[in-house]
Image: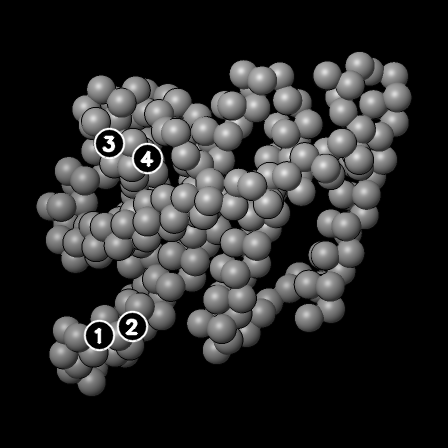
Amino acid sequence: MLGTLRGWRETLLVVAALLATLQLGSLVVPKYILPDVPAIAQAAREVLVSDARDIAATLLRLTEGVAAAFALGSLLGVAMGAVPAVARYARPLLNIMMAVPALNWILFAILWFGSAEVRVFFVVVVISLPFYALNVYEGIRGVPADLVEAVEAFRPTRTQAIRILLLPHTVPYIIMTTRSVLGYAIRITIFAELIGTAIGIGARLNAAQSQFRIDAVFAWTAVLVVINFVLQAAVERLDRRLLRWRPEQALR
């Protein structure tokens, strides 16, 4: 608990330093390049009041995409861990998917799909899925051999083996993956919205850019940072709840 409080205190100090730097910079740089803090705060109030629908649309797209990537990627990771032949062919495919730049996937989505919702969903899933699949696969591979032998000595059913052995060992990998994927998925969602949607934070950023509203761009950036912090805090809370049985270790 104390560690969490210290983390928030340090974050607030960094935010204060950034705001002070921004305010000082606005005194020597034209306002259309670097607005002052009051202008950004006013733009943020406008955003939260008039564009709540766009925030909700982006969060819904993000949730749907990451949830689908988690479900499909975890199933593929389990299949890779259970059937070596699946892993031999799935790993090269996943590595190829990860090597394709996000912009290329967005262009593919625009050319392949007519619906903006399907485009964003496809891009988030195809970029996030490999992380879940590979990490779940590594989690299964990392189960200690002596632990497997100890569990098998009791002749468990397949369901019992999965519940008692595999799930507890792979849950930390899934949570770690979710922490990493969320920040990346937010950026990908915004990028996809920026190009191919009429509603969402990305669409509003595009409108702000076309109107030369740099204060609105800063305001939306602040909103995205807050969203990321809230989501990461939620994942951390879930981590503590699901893994409370695991003792924390620290170097001395």
Q: Are marks 4 and 2 in contact (CB under 8 Å)?
A: no
Res. 97 in view: no
Residue located beneath label 2 in the image: 165
- Give the residue type at disc 1: Ala
| Foreground: disc 3 or disc 2 | 3
User: Is residue 194 at least partly visible in the picture?
Assistant: yes
Alpha-carbon distance for marks 1 and 4? Answer: 37 Å
What is the C-alpha distance between the residues marked 3 and 4? 9 Å
Q: Earlier in the sequence, mark 3 or mark 1?
A: 3
State how the image is colored. one colour
Task: Tell me residue 238's x, y (percent).
Answer: 48, 66
Q: Spatial distance from mark 3 to mark 1, Cα to Cα?
A: 42 Å
Q: Residue at left 37%, top 29%?
A: 197
Q: Secondary structure at mark 3?
A: loop
Question: 10 Å neighbourhood of mark 2: few (<14), some, or many (≥20)?
Answer: some
Q: Is residue 17 left or right of residue 85?
A: right
Q: Nearer the viewer, mark 1 or mark 4?
A: 4
Tell me which amino acid carries mark 3.
Ser
Position of the C terminus, as image quadrant, is bottom right
Q: Establish if 225 lies above or below 215.
A: below
Tell me where residue 196 appears, x and y as whole percent: 35, 25
Q: CA distance from mark 1 to mark 2?
A: 5 Å
Crowding at dot 4, Cα within 10 Å, few <14 / some 14-19 / many 20+, comes out as many
| Mark 1 crowd level (few <14, some 14–19, many ≥20, 10 Å Cα) | some
Q: Which residue is mark 4?
A: 120
Type of residue at label 2?
Answer: Leu
Label for residue 161? 1
Residue at (20%, 82%) from the top-left corner? 153
Q: Is residue 156 left or right of residue 194?
A: left
Circles 3 and 4, Cβ within 8 Å, touching? The answer is no
Q: Tell me which amino acid carries mark 4.
A: Val
